[in-house]
Amino acid sequence: MLLALRSVIVSSAVYQDALDRAHADARVVAHLGDAIEPGFLPVGAIETRSTGGGSGRAAFVIQLEGSTGAGVLHVEAHRWTGLWIYRELTFVADGVRADRSRVSGHPGPGPGPGDAVTSGRCRHAGERLRSASVLGAGANMKPLVLAIALSLAAPLGALAHTDDARAAATAAPDRSPAWVTRSNELAQILIDAQAPFQPESAGFFGVPGYDDQVADFGPDNARRYREAMTAARARLQTQLELERDANVRQDLQILLTSIDESIEGSTLNERYLLPWTDAPQLIFSGINGLLSAQTPPERRAHALARLQRYAGLAEGSTPITTLARQRYEERLSNPDLLQPTKREVQRALDSADTYIAGIRKLFEAYGIDGAEPALDAIATEITAYADWTRSTVLPNARDDTRLPPDLYAFGLKQYGTDIDPQLLMQRAQLAFMEIRAQMQQLAPLVAKEKGIAATDYREVIAALKRDTIPNDRLEASYREVIDAIDPIIERENIVDVPQRQMQMRLGSEAESAASPAPHFRPAPLVGNTGQQGTFVLPLGNPGGDGDGDAYDDFNFDAVRWTLSAHEGRPGHELQFTAMVERGVSLARSMFAFNSVNVEGWALYAEAELVPYEPLDGQLIALQFRLLRAARAMLDPMLNLGLIDRERAGRMLTEDVMLSPAMARQELDRYTVNAPGQATSYFYGYTRILELRMRTELALGAKFDRRAFNNFLLDQGLLPPDQLAEAVETVFIPAQQRR
């Protein structure tokens, strides 16, 4: 029996792959010499299951011998929808004790606001570099110990960066399916066209070669951007006409759609908006993206060069604040262009000093030598830019936050909300009423359990909020819930779970000013060598005006379940882990990215976990679902002039039970920060629910929730229509044949 078990290990794909990586690792070869051979049989166990699309676990050791030495290869992996993913792959030389600790990291914040996955936006060009997150695996070894973590930048079948000039950015061999490799080669055409205009976004997601560069705010930047996009489109259209592989053709359509939206967005922004930029936030985010624990040291070294470019100290550079002023002033003669809103301008002014301090703290924390002249220069530039903004921009800023209808319509489309706003509002209104009724039914049960002398859901939530978690215990308290979620997901067969601890931390003051709500910061997508994304929880409200601007929405006991499920597992963190570990193409991760694809899954993930949470956690989960329905109502209503800000604010504070500070952040989100984005949560969630219902009806007793959820993650960030097509043409037939 033992021999049979060990022979199963030897015949497995993960055993052979581990051996292949050991043979290919120069450090292992240096110790073992030539003619490396495994021992007779490995020691350990392997388990596979047919459920969940093909899952399982493996943990074993392989004795290795060569001409000059011997050692042990430690393998620990899990199987995810037929794909083996390493938790540990470590070679330990004979006689040396290895420290095989878990991977950990402390990534920095994302640049975007809200409880969304963060992503950069280059407003001057009219389009952000579409992007998503990836996670890798590895082992953390102490110095001077001959315990070698082999290349784990990609699992079996994972994607690899295909540009030969930058191949050193990833250490793992290319084990991608042929069509993924081909698709990534084509995606590189678009990356190379976009990245020079948005190098901070490109570098943030791991594209090599841009860490010392800064956003292009030079003359005619919008026109030059559109020309670059048009040229890339022509090349990709030619490839589409020649391509025969169905998967690659689908990815080419994604790339072409992304380009079309980029050009449309840039054109609309230039037609309607004066190009004012919150340059201090852009500078902080650009530095923060490099000076992060998740960024390799060799990349952090470029932070000073980037700072010097921002400050105009690098040869041939102009201070980015000067360029930003020029782009604004050169278009002032056009009276038809909309000024920025007073709210966004004032918020930028309130945060300028915080960004200056945050940049300095980052350079101090990472010990970057020789930065003092550049730090002094950038402080002077940011201060001068703030003074100019205060004297020139603020007096002319507009009070009316509404956008021209076609600009707002484009925003909805860009975020993935492809539904008539009137119909969306009707659906959201109905959902709001139903969710509120559910909350009222649950509230007395929560009150009885918690000893609260109230039955109305509003009073019960107010009482729960008074169970405040002190700031010095906040991270540890969230960690308790995060660690409890994985076993629930596994026990209830919700979805396959990674074999490493999720990352979570509190945001710094500058990070919280840039992203004042809970958010998920992705890890690099390209060239990821083990970096993990992280759930970032802001402290306080750095942009607030006073004592009345404190949050009470994220620091109480019952809210931990919902926020952890959304930002962590089975939400954003799990979705992005799956993208890197399962080998999703760049087109389906970076360029299919929109809020509907991402936030829809995260809200759906929240709902999947609700039945297994304590009663107070369930009530707060419904509160946050009520918020998403309110967003889908209020965002279009405010932008279409169907409700005023005061009435919308009362609904958020009196019905949804947000703090006044959080309600103001929400309203700014709908009208200033990202009009249209807030609709994506409710819309994306309903699209997944519709798809799941159709699948359950088609499969009946054969429906497997775990397999369904795994399949959704396997598709990357496909838009809802394409995702539905994949489920109906691939998943359902495969399940029917079981």
Image (tube, grey):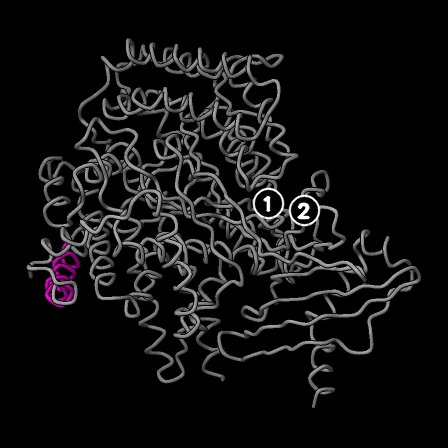
Query: What type is the residue that disc 2 sits on?
Result: Thr
Residue drawn at point x = 64 percent, y = 52 percent: 153
In this view of the protein, which residue sits in the foreground, 677 or 536? Answer: 536
Could you tell me if residue 686 is visible in this image? yes
Q: Secondary structure at mark 2?
A: loop
Query: What type is the residue that disc 1 sits on?
Result: Val
**Mark 2 residue crowding within 10 angstroms, few (<14) / some (14–19) / many (20+):** many
Cα–Cα gap, marks 2 and 1: 8 Å
Residue drawn at point x = 42 percent, y = 17 percent: 324
Magenta-tinted stretch:
429-446
Label for residue 721? Answer: none
Mark with earlier residue (2, 1): 2
In this view of the protein, which residue sits in the foreground, 265 or 116? Answer: 116
Which residue matches tag 2? Answer: 170
Q: Where is residue 157 shown, x and y percent of the image? A: 64, 61
Q: Quadrant of the N terminus?
A: bottom right
Q: Is residue 90 left or right of residue 517?
A: right
Q: Secondary structure at mark 1?
A: loop
Q: Image height check: is 715 above or below 410?
A: below
Which residue matches tag 1? Answer: 526
Which picture quadrant has residue 569? bottom left
**Does the segment drawn in magenta span residue 721?**
no
